[in-house]
Amino acid sequence: MIKVVEWKNNSVVMIDQRILPVRETYRVYRTYRGVAQAIRDMVVRGAPAIGVACAMGIALGALKIRARDFETFKRRFDEVTDLLASTRPTAVNLFWAIERMKGVVERNKRLDVRDIQKRLVEEAKRIHAEDVETNRRIGRHGSRLLKNRSTILTHCNAGALATAGYGTALGVVRGAVERGKKIKVFADETRPFLQGARLTTWELKRDGIDVTLITDNMAGYMMKKGLIDAVVVGADRIASNGDTANKIGTYTVAVLARTHRIPFYVAAPTSTIDMNIRCGDDIPIEERDPAEVTHVCGKRIAPTGIGVMNPAFDVTPARLLSAIITEKGVVRPPFARNLKKLFKNGRR
Ligand code: MRU
């Protein structure tokens, strides 16, 4: 299994996703500030992986706090969580992880600071372990939706690299392959950060899964030719009505899929569902550095001083989704009603 984010001897080790597939380099972080910068710079990326890295960053920060009383500890702890909360705004898993870590502090405020610190490290490790298990469940539920000998299209990287392991959208592919189905994958390259070209192809090839790389603007052509049977993507935040924020370009793929009557599936853990927001309009969309658009691998491809927009995510309206695949089961429309039910009965 690829070690995406790992807790090792009171440090956080992460594979540097900015330089894959050219080099497989692991970076060691000993401070929460370092982890926050790594999330911002996309050394680690993908909603669930960001959540895990954030929890481990908080644990690192908490371990370094020298405080005798709870109030002093809590003040410094809040500085740690505030910094991590400011790194990337769209993926709700980051805020979900912060809430879990804050819950540990709240529940154990009567313990010694040393014991609270120990529990925070344990919680971060638990979030990591749970994520792999969650993805395997998503894979099991989702595998039933893919027919044998089908070809799926995916956008960005919602694979092992975007999680603690196994993946969400690619977890569905892995789940189907493990159950003996023959599945082919078309991977959109995913401009501007090229998560599809660099990461999805890399991890699928490593697992011996048949993958074909296409540029983003080829998806419609492939669908028209009848080469795509289903689309499976991940998510960064799903609103309570099912509207889904995912990597920029996902919305375009969903519109194309609807036109060609191809099922469009979103695979995501329930930690990606934000029941506090009504619809996609309430999801904050990260705007990233224009250099990601004007440059490819450090090389300028556009005139200097040109106007650039670089939203990192878009929102696909719920009406374009065939289903949302979670660890608790497959949710079908109407999403507003069925997501509420999912959280109510907690079925696995
Ligand atoms: O900017 P990124 O690379 O963090 O964006 C990642 C995505 O959009 C993924 O599709 C999403 O986080 C799901 S990952 C299981």
Image (cartoon, rainbow, N blue to C red):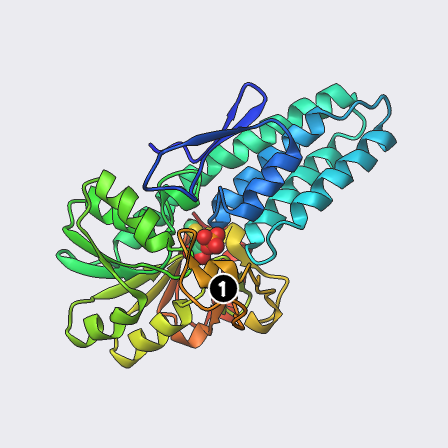
Residue 150: image x %, image y %?
A: 16, 59
**Which residue is at a point 46% across and 69% down the rendered structure image?**
303
Q: Which percent across, then down, holds residue 71?
A: 87, 32
Mark yes or no: residue 262 visible.
no
Residue projecting furthest to the bottom: 259
Q: Is residue 332 above or below residue 30?
A: below
Which residue in the protein does label 1 denote?
313
Q: Tell me, yes or no, if residue 198 can be seen here.
A: yes
Where disc 1 sits, the SS reads: strand
Q: Which image quarter: residue 248? A: bottom left
What residue sits 57% from the left and 54% below the top? 92
Q: Quadrant of ligand 1?
A: bottom left
The relative height of residue 21 versus residue 262 in the rendered view (above or below) is above
Is 74 rendered above or below residue 201? Answer: above
Q: Is mark 1 within 8 Å of ligand 1?
A: yes
Q: Residue at x 54, y 46 (%)?
A: 41
Front position in the image: 292 or 225: 292
Neighbours of disc 1 within 10 Å: few (<14), some (14-19), many (20+): many
